[in-house]
Image: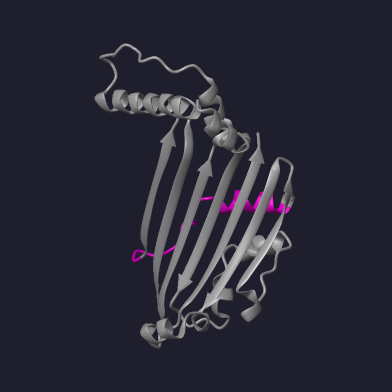
Amino acid sequence: MGMLSRLRERLDATFENRGGAEAERFAFSAELPAGRRGPICSVNVQVLVEPQQDGDRVRVRAHLQSNLASVLRPALRAQPEVEPAVSTSRSLVQASGQRMSRIAGNGLQRVMASRVVSRITEPLLRRDFNTWVEVQASTEPLNDGAHSIVPQQDKLASLGIRPSKGRSALAESWSGHTPTGFAQLSLLQIDKQDLPPDLVRRMGPRPFQLAAAIVNTVERK
C-alpha cells in the first residue's frame, strides 16, 4: 500500500529543530555487526523533553531495523573471513572493531550450520523487518486530550488517514501490501481516564495524555 510506504519513510526522518534552550535532548544507537556487509540489526532512539507553560511534553522516536535478508543471509552463505595481517597504520580501536565484526560473522555461520536451525530460520532470512515508533506524552491541559498530540497528524491527513477521537480511538490500525512486502500502521491514544483508577489517584490532579504511532514493514529480498 503506497500511503503506508510513504508514511514510514517520513517517520524515519530526524526530529525537527524545535524546543527552546530549556529543552533536553538524548539519543543513542546500537547495532549487531556481520563482518563487512553491515549490521544484522540496529536500533536508533531519540528523546526530546520540552517544558511547557502548564506542564511538560516528551517525544520519543525509535527505529529498529533487522537486515536478515540483505545482510545476514549472504553473510551465512559466504566463506569465513580470514584475519588480515596487522597494519601499523590502523589504530587499535579500528583493528579491534574490525576483528569483533569478523568474529561475530564467523560465529553466526557456525550456529546456522545446524540443519534444524536453518530449517526454522529460512523463511525469516528471506525478509527484512523495520519498526518505527513515535510516542508523545504530555502533562498539559489539552482540549482534545491525547488526540491533540497524535504524531504526524498533518502527514497522516495527507495520506488519507484521520485518527478518531474519544473512547473509540484507544487503538486503531491500517495495513496493506507494498510493492516489496507488507506494511502496518497502528495508532494509540491514551488519556488519563483510560488508566487504572489506582494509578490515576496516585498521579494526582495533573493532566496526562499519551499518543503513539507504530509503523511495521516486512520487505522481501
Q: Quadrant of residue 218?
A: top right
Q: Which residues are magenta?
A: 3-22
Q: Quadrant of residue 161?
A: bottom right
| Position of residue 115 measured from the top left corner of the image (x, y, whole percent) | 55, 28
* Badge count: 0
Q: Residue at x 40, y 68 (%)?
A: 50
Please tell me which residue lies in front, 120 or 148.
120
Q: Residue at x 50, y 25 (%)?
A: 113
Residue with the most extreme top position = 85
Q: Is residue 203 left or right of residue 184?
A: left
| Position of residue 52 measured from the top left corner of the image (x, y, whole percent) | 41, 75
Q: Is residue 88 left or right of residue 31?
A: left
Residue with the most extreme front position = 116
Can you say whether 200 is above or below 13 in the image?
below
Is residue 17 found inside the magenta-colored segment of the image?
A: yes
Please tell me which residue lies in front, 125 or 168.
125
Can you say whether 62 is above or below 191 in the image?
above
Please tell me which residue lies in front, 14 or 43.
43
Is residue 193 found inside the magenta-colored segment of the image?
A: no
Q: Is residue 205 left or right of residue 159?
A: left
Q: Quadrant of residue 21?
A: bottom left
Can you say whether 199 is above or below 183 in the image?
below
Quadrant location, the C terminus: top right
Q: Can residue 166 be seen here?
A: no
| Position of residue 72 measured from the top left corner of the image (x, y, whole percent) | 52, 31
Can you say whether 220 is above or below 36 in the image?
below
Instruction: Name the image colouring.
Output: one colour
Q: Residue at x 49, y 16 (%)?
A: 79
| Position of residue 57 measured from the top left corner of the image (x, y, whole percent) | 43, 70
Q: Residue at x 57, y 36 (%)?
A: 121
Please tell me which residue lies in front, 178 or 47.
178
Q: Can residue 187 be seen here?
A: yes
